[in-house]
Image (spheres, rainbow, N blue to C red):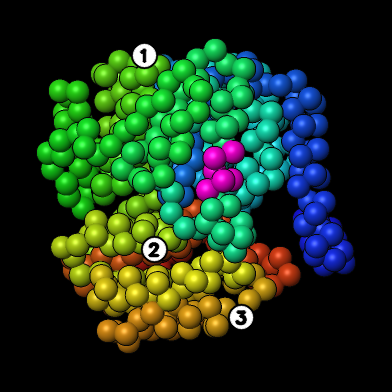
Amino acid sequence: MEHILRTVEKIIPKKVYNFFQPAYHFVLATTGTILYKNPSRHIFVIGVTGTKGKSSTVEFVNAVLEASGKKTAILSTIRFKIGDMSRPNLYKMTMPGRFFTQKFLRDAVDAECEYAIIEMTSEGARFFRHKGIHMDALIFTNLSPEHIESHGSFAKYKQAKLRLVKQLAKSKKEVRLAIANIDNEHAPSFLIYPIEKNIGYSLKDVHILSETEQESTIEWKGEKISIPLPGKFNISNALAALHFAEEVGISIDDAKKGIESLSLIRGRVEKIDEGQDFTVIVDYAHTDDSLRKLYETFKDSRKIAVLGSTGGGRDSWKRPILGKIADEYCDEIIVTNEDPYDEDPMKIIHEVAGGITQHTPNIILNRREAIAYALSIAKKGDVVLITGKGTDPYIMGKNGAKETWDDATVAREEIKKITTK
């Protein structure tokens, strides 16, 4: 089907294709809702949206719910989960089309899940994949420039996100809840709709007792809570889950237990430990803000960056900016391939490298070789930060070509080559 759609896109004039594409997706979303008997009306649905932190917030919310004894389902960039069954998301899209979300919800209802947590994207909203979903709650994490070429402007990107809170306002659920990170300047836009509960959360709500490169400890509502993942961004993500828990009546003890149980989120500040004497981190960071915050989390360590580049055909404006941020924070920089699609990968790489002026970057096209080189030059106490892909399952090339991929797996394989010599 994907091959057919790519062929059709090439044959039909672009203006005609773009004109009919929204209607096609709207019909699919409506048909799916009817076909699967409106499953969202029979389960508590939590949407999570924002530019960054969506997948992590989904996992924090899930951990809190499971700690309170609830049976949950997850649809996210990282995985699809229904009850105890979980599988990786190999679609390279957060909200797959062609009835996928409605079928997922129907399967969750049939499995007697009480809650479904759905990561919702601007691209998903653009193609009406949120239509027919009656949400009980929507969590907004943040908003910053992303997918600009796809949407046409930042204003249109924001409007696509706002479609989601408008969908919440249209929901048939009795008590609807909007939770937004008011540390982000765009949060007020998500808290102005006629919804029963509009809740803001902020890092100002908590007292940060300690913060290291491994974890943080906060005091919230008089309770000391350890967050076993590093970075202020993870404190903010955990805080969203804590506020949600409070609003739906989950006890502080269960909420704490859930937060403290979440020591790993795949591809999100994921620590790769094969006995080496330096730290290796795999992270999805692919915006200027997320990359900066990741590097700041390891501010006391010598940093080696394996810097992917933005995917071909999108957000080319930020390529030199990513290079500039790596230049500012890192001691060694390797610029490599990521997802070139139909663009020349070396062109993308050189555009990223164009932002690097203080260091001499190493240009290594092959991503495995780039990771291997970064590991080979790491010394005791260093941090190797492999960014851009997280859990992305493929490297995407010309004409839809796919190379099966996983940064964490490749890093483990290359570390073992070093440690077994």
Q: Quadrant of residue 129?
A: top right
Where's residue 391, x and y in %?
A: 49, 53
Number of numbered labels in the structure image: 3
Where's residue 374, x and y in %?
A: 34, 74
> What kind of element bears circle 2?
helix
Where's residue 400, x and y in %?
A: 71, 65
Dot 3 or dot 2: first in sequence order is 2
Q: Verify CB contact (< 8 Å) between mark 1 and mark 2.
A: no
Q: Is residue 3 visible?
A: no
| Of 246 and 260, the residue lying toward us | 246
Q: Quadrant of residue 413?
A: bottom left
Callout 2, which amino acid? Asp
Q: Main secondary structure of the magenta part?
A: helix
The mark lying in front, picked from 3 and 2, is: 2
Rendered image: mark on residue 249: 1
> Which region shows up in magenta?
158-163
Residue 337 lies, with reference to residue 78, above or below; the image says below
Mark 3, residue position: 344
Q: Verify CB contact (< 8 Å) between mark 3 and mark 2.
A: no
Dot 1 or dot 3: first in sequence order is 1
Residue lying at 52% horizontally and 56% vertically, measured from the top left: 154
Rendered image: mark on residue 288: 2
Q: CA distance from mark 1 to mark 3?
A: 52 Å
> What kind of element bears circle 3?
loop
Callout 1, which amino acid? Gly
Dot 1 or dot 2: first in sequence order is 1
Magenta-drawn stretch contains 343: no
Other residues around mark 2 within 10 Å, as few (<14) / some (14–19) / many (≥20)? many
